[in-house]
Image (cartoon, coloured by chain):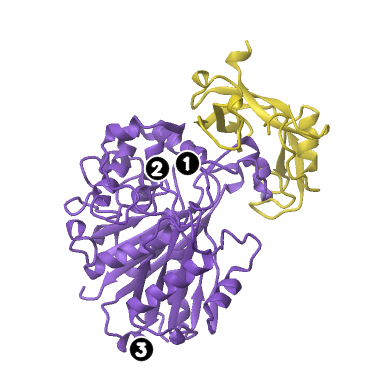
């Protein structure tokens, strides 16, 4: 078993635009048109006010690391894919989303500025967002 | 029935096994049920309410039905609230409410499981995507340990908490475990031992993590009328609170848990405050779980947990807040990966004066608190405040 390409997430009618968007290089968040909440993960009812007037918002794809953990040993995960950096990234639009930081762990810290990348899954038109440090891009 | 009618824990039992390769999970449920009823001095026929949560080996089973069937129970009330490991603490409150509502008089709560015999390895199951949320979380290889690791990292970032301070939690638990013949790990460890143990999910080390054990436990909760018939020292359920806490649409705060709400509600119902607590059972899935719970329950200010627990605060019998005197989930037992049951059992032992003598404290008021699920996504916080009979 390998971890790349990633397994296919559970694509539901309400989340399909998110996963398809990722395969097109777009990070989509949900924005409530009534109360203004920008949230993640996607839901058709705003989790604050239950309004159904929710639209997709394309995020800039940048944010900073809110927290992270470095997994050194894990059963069921290929050794060559370790260590694995699991993180919450706080997007500039507001929501904190769980993700991976694809970088050497010594360049990752709380507050590190990151930008989105997309990883293929076992299905062509479904991808998942991960992040890389902006400084490492330059 | 009055809303303030006294309700008691009359029986408490912890299965002595930590590894049960030759027993079925249902057999363990039955053995702990019998143990708790024997402890209370009650026959099975008196049980008229039943509480349990998930049955880990039977993923799709209707847990109250399969367990009640195996036990041969004839009850008028059942509840299977599942907050993960803290479920059984919530069940104490639910049983108390059902008794006060006149639905039942003798409630049985059971937990059992065999993750150790099933060969569950640390961090396994990363690839299993079962819930809607897993597609946004576990698809990244997030494990329970890495999620608690993220909580620890954020706490360290915001408040300067150190790995050495987290290690104090394990040190205290190990000091207590040396007197518990049934504890999985009975050797006392030092702060250095903890921070020098293998890093599993940075910043958490192997010794920051709880054990994986088979076994279980059970409780018997009774009405005032039922208690009057018993020849057994009982423990009063003074207050209960719970809080299903979640990701909050992307605003999750990794340094704060549902204990803020569950603890406040439990203390309010009891008419007591943290300074009245003589002994604390606190769910210790990881060392950070304890640190955040101590702050959120109000034993110290947010962010000051690291300093608060330095210098033996958690160590019985002389520390200011003796905790987990059986060795807890970190050293003694974490049956079925669900540590709430043993938290209530040890609090009952303390209030009855039945803890191991070296760690027995002079306790009139105790709390048992749990955080089931993951503090980095969704968790059910549950708290009970308990009082001794001679209080
Ligand atoms: Zn809204």
Left or right: residue A111 compared with residue B41: right
Left or right: residue B35 compared with residue B57: left
Please name the residue shown 79% across and 35% down the image.
A126
Q: In the rendered image, which quarter is residue A30 located in? A: top right
Q: Earlier in the sequence, mark 1 or mark 2?
A: 1
Residue identified by numbered label 1? B148
Label 3: which secondary element: helix
Please name the residue shown 80% across and 40% down the image.
A17
Which chain is mark 1 on? B
Q: Position of residue B285 (x, y in %)?
A: 42, 48
Task: State whether residue B294 is above or below residue B274.
Answer: above
Label 1: which secondary element: helix
Q: Do discs 1 and 2 share a chain? A: yes
Confirm or reject: label 1 Cβ below 8 Å from ligand 1. Answer: no
* Label 1–label 2 contact, CB within 8 A: yes
Determine crowd level at label 3: few under 14, some 14-19, many 20+ residues with C-alpha closer than 10 A: few
Determine crowd level at label 2: few under 14, some 14-19, many 20+ residues with C-alpha closer than 10 A: many
Q: Nearer the viewer, residue A119 or A29?
A: A119
Q: Earlier in the sequence, mark 1 or mark 3?
A: 1
Residue identified by numbered label 3? B225
Q: Nearer the viewer, residue B150 or A14?
A: B150
Residue identified by numbered label 2? B288
Q: In the rendered image, which quarter is residue B46 located in? A: bottom left
- The hue of chain B in the figure is purple
Marks 1/2: CA–CA distance: 7 Å
Label 2: which secondary element: helix
Q: Do discs 2 and 3 share a chain? A: yes
Q: Which chain is yellow?
A: A
Residue A75 can be seen, yes or no: yes
């Amino acid at each position: 078993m390998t971890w790349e390409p990633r397994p296919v997430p559970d694509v539901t009618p309400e989340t399909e635009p998110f996963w398809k968007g990722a395969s097109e290089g777009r990070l989509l968040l949900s924005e409530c048109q009534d109360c203004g909440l920008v949230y993640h993960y996607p839901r058709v009812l705003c989790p604050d006010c239950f309004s159904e007037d929710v639209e997709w918002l394309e995020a800039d794809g940048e944010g900073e690391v809110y927290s992270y953990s470095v997994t050194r040993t894990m059963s069921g995960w290929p050794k060559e894919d370790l260590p694995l950096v699991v993180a919450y990234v706080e997007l500039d639009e507001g929501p904190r989303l769980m993700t991976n930081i694809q970088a050497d762990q010594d360049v990752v810290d709380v507050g590190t500025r990151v930008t989105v990348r997309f990883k293929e899954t076992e299905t062509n038109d479904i991808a998942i967002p991960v992040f890389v440090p902006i400084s490492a891009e330059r | 029935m009055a809303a303030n009618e006294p309700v008691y824990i009359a029986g408490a039992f912890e299965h002595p096994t930590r590894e049960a390769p030759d027993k079925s999970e249902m057999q363990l449920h039955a053995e702990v049920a019998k143990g708790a009823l024997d402890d209370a001095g009650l026959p099975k026929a008196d049980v008229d309410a039943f509480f349990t949560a998930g049955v880990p080996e039977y993923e799709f089973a209707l847990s109250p039905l399969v367990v009640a069937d195996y036990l041969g129970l004839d009850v008028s009330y059942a509840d299977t609230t599942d907050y993960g490991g803290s479920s059984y603490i919530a069940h104490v409150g639910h049983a108390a409410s059902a008794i006060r509502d006149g639905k039942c008089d003798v409630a049985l709560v059971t937990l059992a499981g065999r993750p150790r015999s099933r060969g569950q390895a640390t961090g396994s199951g990363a690839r299993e995507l079962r819930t809607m949320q897993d597609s946004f979380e576990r698809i990244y290889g997030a494990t329970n340990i890495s999620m608690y690791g993220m909580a620890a990292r954020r706490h360290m970032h915001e408040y300067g908490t150190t790995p050495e301070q987290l290690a104090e939690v394990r040190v205290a638990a190990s000091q207590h475990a040396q007197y518990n013949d049934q504890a999985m790990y009975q050797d006392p460890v030092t702060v250095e031992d903890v921070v020098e143990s293998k890093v599993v999910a940075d910043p958490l080390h192997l010794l920051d993590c709880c054990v994986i054990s088979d076994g279980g436990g059970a409780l018997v909760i009774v009405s005032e009328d039922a208690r009057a018939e018993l020849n057994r020292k009982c423990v009063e359920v003074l207050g209960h609170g719970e809080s299903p806490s979640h990701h909050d649409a992307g605003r999750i705060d990794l340094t704060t848990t549902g204990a803020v709400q569950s603890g406040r509600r439990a203390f309010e119902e009891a008419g007591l405050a943290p300074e009245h607590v003589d002994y604390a059972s606190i769910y210790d899935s990881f060392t950070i779980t304890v640190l955040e719970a101590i702050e959120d329950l109000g034993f110290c200010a947010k962010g000051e947990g690291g300093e608060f627990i330095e210098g033996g605060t958690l160590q019985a019998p002389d520390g200011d807040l003796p905790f987990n005197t059986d060795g807890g989930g970190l050293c003694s037992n974490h049956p079925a990966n669900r540590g709430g049951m043993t938290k209530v059992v040890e609090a009952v032992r303390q209030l009855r004066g039945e803890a191991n003598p070296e760690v027995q404290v002079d306790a009139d008021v105790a709390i048992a608190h749990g955080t089931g699920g993951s503090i980095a996504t969704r968790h059910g916080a549950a708290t009970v405040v308990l009082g001794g009979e001679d209080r």
